[in-house]
Amino acid sequence: MPEARKPGCPFCGDISPGVVVYDDPLVYAIVSQRPINDYHVLVIPKHHYEQFIDLPDPLAAHLFVVAKHLSHAVRQVRPMDAICHLSDDDITGAGYNLVRHYKLHIIPRHVGDRVVINWNRDPDPGEAARSALAAEIRSALAKLGMPEGGLPAAGGAEQRTTSTK
């Protein structure tokens, strides 16, 4: 079990009630103190977890359902061209996360907002290379105990077939 509150963590401390947009026993959401754009919201677990993979599955599912509803609400109050749902696990401590407490960002985007996410994508390496990578990941999933056919769909979740594209 993680620490309920980690000393010195700003997300484990007291949060000004005025900036809270959502609060339940597991997660809360606030307007970002250092927003990328107006209405930039952070969805944060109340217990201290540093990385996405540290979240217990029920908490991860809950956090994403809350984020889905918050994303819908932000769309109602802010005209936008796009919305970004983003989180980073700073695995090596290279500075990808300013605060080492897991959070999911909901960031409204609009043309001309000066935010640059340059994916710097390489060309398609081809199906054989992608298949080799997929085999490595499937092997790692098996070692982690993921069932061959995947996890059962959550109640009411639609199932879809996969494509190679």
Image (cartoon, rainbow, N blue to C red):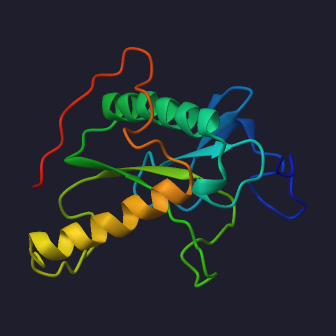
x and y, in percent, of residue 7 in the image:
90, 61
Q: Residue at x 51, y 65 (%)?
A: 88
Q: Residue at x 60, y 43 (%)?
A: 30
Answer yes or no: is residue 20 visible: no
Task: Count how many numbered circles sit on residues in the image.
Answer: 0
Nearer to us in this view, 153 or 56: 153
x and y, in percent, of residue 55 in the image:
65, 47
The answer to whether residue 144 is above or below residue 131 is above
Using residue 152 as the reference point, say whether residue 96 is left or right of it: right
Q: Residue at x 59, y 55 (%)?
A: 53
Using residue 2 as the reference point, say whether residue 70 is left or right of it: left
Answer yes or no: is residue 33 visible: yes
Considering every residue shown, the one lying at the far top of the view is 156
Q: Residue at x 42, y 63 (%)?
A: 139
x and y, in percent, of residue 70 in the image:
46, 32
Using residue 149 as the reference point, say whether residue 8 is left or right of it: right
State which quadrant residue 74 falls in.
top left
Using residue 82 as the reference point, say whether residue 15 is left or right of it: right
